[in-house]
Amino acid sequence: MTLIDPPGFESRSLLFEQTVDFPQVLALPHRQSLPEGDVLTFRFSNGYGAVVTRAAGQSLETAFEFGVLDCTGPQPQLTVLTPVCATVLQGVSYEQVAQLLPRTERLPSHPEWQRSLVSLQNEEF
């Protein structure tokens, strides 16, 4: 702390936090940094996505939460209707998230997207 720092200022800089990447998936996430940690939102071409949160200051063994998203609507929503996970997983490791993301990316197309494709095929342009 220096004399010009505001009261309550913490000198721990987020710039020195190790960022995490997941090269196992093709989609680049939307990354949002918060004081409590990072939120990464993935959208995949199959109509699903994933939200990964990482708590600041925790080790890579327990710092993550993972949830599958339904991305067929205007705003992604958490879903438990996939074989990847039936709930939001908390306290998971980087390795576990790195395995769950490709599984989510490889899910069959979302049923809503399949219905939309059938509707489009029946349209005359």
Image: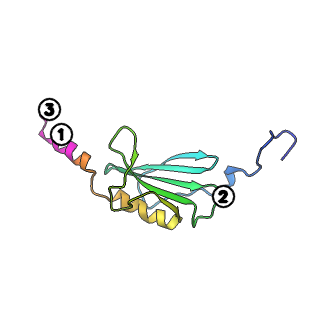
Q: Residues within 10 Å of mark 2 (few under 14, many from 20)?
A: few
In-front residue for pair 103/69 = 69
Q: Which mark is residue 57?
A: 2
Q: Between tags 2 and 3, which lies in front?
A: 2
- The magenta span reads 115-125
Residue 75 shown left or right of residue 109 in the figure: right
> Reading the chain from its start, which is encountered first: label 1 or label 2?
2
Magenta region, main secondary structure: helix
> Reading the chain from its start, which is encountered first: label 1 or label 3?
1
Q: Between tags 1 and 3, which lies in front?
A: 1
Q: Name the residue tied to disc 3.
A: 125
Q: Residue at x 74, y 52 (%)?
A: 12
Q: Residues within 10 Å of mark 1 (few under 14, many from 20)?
A: few
Residue 8 shown left or right of residue 62 in the figure: right
* Secondary structure of the residue carrying numbered label 2: loop
Q: Position of residue 17 (x, y in %)?
A: 66, 55
In-front residue for pair 5/21 = 5
* Secondary structure of the residue carrying numbered label 3: loop
At label 1, the amino acid type is Leu
How far apart marks 2 and 3 lie (CA) works out to 55 Å
Q: Please say if the residues under marks 1 and 2 sit with CB atoms less than 8 Å apart.
A: no
The image quarter containing residue 101 is: bottom left
Q: Please say if the residues under marks 2 and 3 sit with CB atoms less than 8 Å apart.
A: no
* Secondary structure of the residue carrying numbered label 1: helix
How far apart marks 1 and 2 lie (CA) works out to 48 Å
Q: Name the residue tied to disc 1.
A: 120
